Image (cartoon, rainbow, N blue to C red):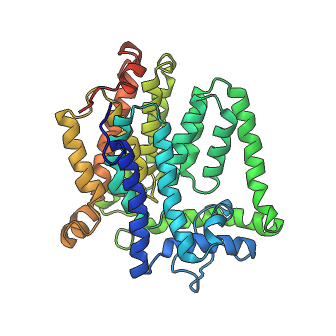
Amino acid sequence: MEKKFLRLTGYQWVQVLYISVAVALWALKLFHPRFNNFNVFRASFYNLTNQVNLYAAHPAQHYDYYYYGPLFGLFFAPFALPPKLIGLLLWELANAVALLAAVHWLPLDERRKKILLLLCVIEFANSAFSEQFNPMIAAGIIFTFMLVEKGKDGWAALLTVLGALMKLYPVVGLAFFLFSKSKGRFVIYTAVSTVVLLALPLLFTGFDFLTASYREWLPAVSHKNMINHDLLARSQDICVMGIVRDFTQNPNIPDFPFLVAAAVIFALPLLRFSQYKSEKFRLQVLATSLIMVVIFSTGAENPTFIIPLTGISLWLTMQEKPFTRANIILIIFLMILTGLGLTDAIPQGIRRDIIGKYGMKAWPCIVAWVIITWQLMFKDFTAEETSSAVLHSKQDVV
């Protein structure tokens, strides 16, 4: 049994750490009141309910554009209605709690959960500093997977559709349909959830405005993707396609061939139906899902990488021996390039002219994705020691 300090286990202290990071970064905003992303999110609720164009420029509210679905404005209501600083605190705490709850539900022992969270804490801080939604997205994908595992297909379908109608990343949760024991119900629940959630904002806005908003959403995202291709004036596109554009200095390289290749590579391991009975195989599919949605997204930016790092950390902690020499080298590069690479911890010249210029933040994640995908394609998970004996073991994994 793990020793306690001040009546808390090491795992519980890591949970306290996440809450403390969320509060500390909120407190930082009291002295440097710049929280544009929160202003964008907060304005979406008021623009939705007042039937003001969500995707137009609103310089009096914020200095960016809104790229989420109309449903997100409604989702953000609990954080938009309180005074701004209170709403921001609740938002930061909600992201921390969501990720902690999702990790807590994973079928790992507490020692492995503790290591997973420690590996992710820098990226959580990056996301929290930018008041971003990404910890909730990672949590939502994990919750969807676990709901399927528990046979709660209705809730899994609802959560997938909810996430996808706000930001497209959670649509990857539909892949977990293959692990469902009630596929017919999953399809029905997905269809019903889609209809209900598409119409839900009608409780607060008009039909014509809502349909116009849906028509404007995807063109707005497509326009953002075009902006992201600009090699000089972007902070996003930190992905496989962006790296190729960086090295070739050709902003016109299209995304489509890369996305098709990614979809095929993602699908191939899912044809190994005999492996589905392995819990470790299914968890590794969850891990690669969390990675893939970001490293093949032109919208990938510094705060987004809490999503793939959660997947990589899950894969690492699933290993019988997580801290092999190769894994330690990978972790070091994840901490330096991915976690700290675009922060003030790295000198500006290196950060801007090397790490930023060539999308190096994504490099360790891509390496991990290749390794994980190779294992999913060729490793016999069913021949290993039973997954529960490894994942739930109380033995020291160091």
Which residue is most to the bottom? 60
Q: Position of residue 191 (x, y in %)?
A: 74, 41
At horizontal 53% and vertical 75% (from top left) the residue drawn is 85
When the figure is inspected, residue 326 is found, relative to residue 339, above or below; the finding is: above
Q: Is residue 12 left or right of residue 140?
A: left
Q: Quadrant of the C terminus?
A: top left
Which residue is most to the top? 383
When the figure is inspected, residue 114 is found, relative to residue 62, above or below; the finding is: above
Which residue is most to the left? 325
Q: Is residue 386 left or right of residue 136?
A: left
Q: Is residue 161 left or right of residue 141?
A: right
**Residue 329 visible (yes or no):** yes
**Residue 302 visible (yes or no):** no
When the figure is inspected, residue 24 is found, relative to residue 153, above or below; the finding is: below
Q: Position of residue 274 (x, y in %)?
A: 49, 16
Q: Position of residue 58 (x, y in %)?
A: 60, 81
At horizontal 57% and vertical 70% (from top left) the residue drawn is 87
Query: Toward the viewer: 161 or 248?
Result: 161
Query: Toward the viewer: 29 or 387?
Result: 29
Query: Which of the 4 image quadrants contains residue 220?
Result: bottom right
Query: Toward the viewer: 168 or 153?
Result: 153
Q: Position of residue 115 (x, y in %)?
A: 32, 41
At horizontal 60% and vertical 51% (from top left) the residue drawn is 163
Query: Which of the 4 image quadrants contains residue 210?
Result: bottom right
